[in-house]
Image (cartoon, coloured by chain):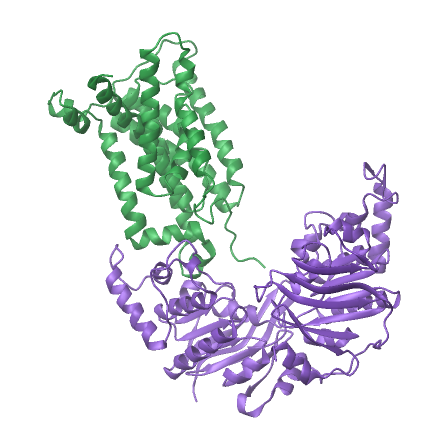
Chain colours: A purple, B green
Amino acid sequence: MDAFLRMEHVSKRFGDFYANRDINFSVRRGEVHTLLGENGAGKSTLMNVLIGLYQPTEGTIYLDGKKVRIDSPAQAVKLGIGMVHQHFMLVEAMTVFENIILGDRNTRGIFIDREARTKEIQALSARYGLEVELDKPITEISVGAQQRVEILKALYRGAELLILDEPSAALTDLEVEGLFDIMRKLTGEGKSIIFISHKMREVLRISDRITILRAGRTVCTVDRTETNGEELANLMIGRELAPSHYEKITEPGEPVVSLEKVDYHKESKHNGLCGVSLSVGRREIVGIAGVDGNGQSQLAQVVTGVLTPDAGEVDLKGSRVAQFTPNGFILESVSHIPEDRNKMGLIGDMSVKENIVLKSTDTPQFSSARGFHLKKRAIRDYAEQMREKYDIRCTSVEQEARNLSGGNQQKVILARELEGQPDLLVAVHPTRGLDIGATRFVHDTMIDAREKGCGVLLISADFDEILEVSDRIVVMFEGQVMGVFSGKEPPIQEISLAMAGK
Amino acid sequence: MSWDFISNLLLASVRMATPLIFLSLAELYSQRAGLVHIGLEGLAAIGSLVGFLVSLITGSPMLGVLAGALAGILVNMIFAYATISLCAEQIVYGMAINIFAPALAAFIYRVYFGAGSTLVQVTLMNNLSTTLGITSDNFLLKLLLDQTPMVYLAYALVIFTAIYFNKTKSGLNYKAVGEYPKAAATLGINVIGVKYIACIICGALAGMGGAFLTTCYSNTYVDGNVAGRGFIALAAVIFGRWSGGGVLLACLFFGFCDALQIRLQVGSFGVPYQFFQMIPYIATVVVLALIGMKKAGPKGAGKPYLREDR
């Protein structure tokens, strides 16, 4: 069958770094083609090239057999390429109707012909089963409905090729079903869809073909009918699911932190906790597995004193916590690697050395008179030591933290949080966006901390990471604990069922 | 209170509201494109001086207004380049315009007329009734005809603005730039272009508002003649919920306060006149306090728009 879109030998370079290298990728008419790959595999870059936000360094794009140059998003729209971004591009203050016709160039006239446009939109929405209420403001409709508006928006502009970037991430199960129905209708009418996701179950259900990207390159393209989840996972990661590098511990020490029936906004399925009981012992890494947005963030914030639970008890090193304040937890030597290093973990405008001592500026080591006067020299020397020890690659410790690469930023945080031997480390997505070397370093450091008697609560959406380092695995789904499993020879099948809420 | 007093008060309100309408519309066009501009005071000052000079030299107040608009655009291009192309802080640059432009106006005035010169006066723009040769004491006729063309222009602009933002495609795109520039850009709307156009409109309207003061309102230029109208306009936009019609009502309200305070000053003895002068400003503070809690302005206002960076 003829390809509708062909991308040949496409490369995109940023400085010395190839985000895409010699990518070959094609999409047929009427198919759902999935782009599969880990974070940083180059999916977003490739799509940004396709919609005209980036110019490829090399390579050519063919549409319908003709060579095309896509130098702006407007050009992509003209060529019939539409994208539904992961973070919706909807103007909240406007109605559904206004959002759909926004930027319209197909119709003549100065004024908005409401009646005619409404008819056109309704025809489209009826044809593809995209139900929307045109007169409602965006703020008053559900996330699923907002997504339908985005799809309608693309179709209204005459999209023949639709890019859906992690469309199911924010949807409920029922909404995902609805989305799949719509996708099938669209492909039935000859439209092509590029589907970006890393939820294996969904990928296997909806795709016709799957292209796997790894480290900026195409690994291969496979037919849905000729593959299975295991093979895809292996292709994506680039190795057989290897047994863990680390020795797992089965008998941890006394608990450092324990939660007893903790509730937080428990009616909220995706941002709350409902009756969570768990404990982390000394010399133990407890991994929280689960799809992002099932209460993990809230759990991390409760055990670091950022949020106060609505009900339930939290014990820290055997004594009940009465007041939840971040400082109180820090004084009890709880360390935190927050989920967003740029927002919570570091102060980007401050230097590496300042970020390293941020939590201990009051100590006699770095200041006299409790932080009144900083010992600049001592801070500098200490930062140099940490730079050495944690292999932080920066031009100098005076460099602004924001200018470091993600991996090195994370090392700055590790240096701050793990020096001084915490009793509990709460690590949230500690390797998100890091390359393999940096990831290994973070894991080694966590294991080291464990050996020194620290309890680690690891929260990660990366299942492999959980399997790799956890001594015990706790699965969370919609704010609840679905099960606790051993980290030594983990029952993968059962765990993945629990992650899906079964 | 006599009918005379009331009718004169209402007539004056309309007159007083006119410069505010120009300035508020200037602010509205700016904010709708995501640019919070607190420098209208400065733009109006330069507009009022240039308007004054040109109408003095040419003898035509109309040309004066036109020149005021051009001067406003010119000065506002500093703000535009800094905030749009360089992504500088809008508040800081607005403030810079407020400090720079009135000083520039005062400087030009001194250079042109020399220090300590006698007060120079220009002829004001004619009222429509004078042009048509109709004189009447009828209140309605006076309200409709005893006005300069600038007043009609102001109301026409309000109507145009209301239609533009609510009924036209271009107006919808314009609003999207102020709300969510990234979304607008993905739909092929030229975000940077719209923002520059906004600055041209804003500069022109603010310059005209300033020129109104020296070509239609008072026949001389004095430093500080804008007298906080640039800031009242800012309040009027918030009070008017960022819509053409709302802004008009807000301006009429503030214009009424202004007209009232002048009349109270004249009509009462024993109370220091400064107390009455405070009325428009106190009204501004009160109105903002009452309405400020429900901010509903453009979401992207005040934030710079950076094109896709990695």
Near-viewer residue (A75 or A31): A31
* Quadrant (top left, top right, bottom left, bottom right) of the N terminus of chain A: bottom left
User: Total of numbered circles in the picture?
Assistant: 0
Near-viewer residue (A330 or B189): A330
Q: Position of residue A426 (x, y in %)?
A: 75, 62
Q: Residue at x 29, y 26 (%)?
A: B64
Q: Quadrant of residue A99?
A: bottom left
Reply above or below: A475 against A16. below
Near-viewer residue (A65 or A145): A145
Residue A121 in the figure: left or right of residue A82: left
Near-viewer residue (B276 or B28): B276
Q: Position of residue A339 (x, y in %)?
A: 67, 61
Q: Quadrant of residue A438?
A: bottom right
Q: Residue at x 38, y 14 (%)?
A: B113
Q: Residue at x 33, y 29 (%)?
A: B19
Q: Position of residue B48 (x, y in %)?
A: 36, 25
Reply above or below: A208 against A405. below
Q: Position of residue A469 (x, y in %)?
A: 78, 73
Residue A19 in the figure: left or right of residue B22: right
Q: Quadrant of residue A288?
A: bottom right
Residue B2 in the figure: left or right of residue A400: left
* Quadrant (top left, top right, bottom left, bottom right) of the C terminus of chain A: bottom right
Q: Residue furthest bottom?
A: A226
Q: Residue at x 43, y 17 (%)?
A: B111
Q: Is residue A360 visible?
A: yes
Q: Residue furthest top?
A: B270
Q: Is residue B68 visible?
A: no
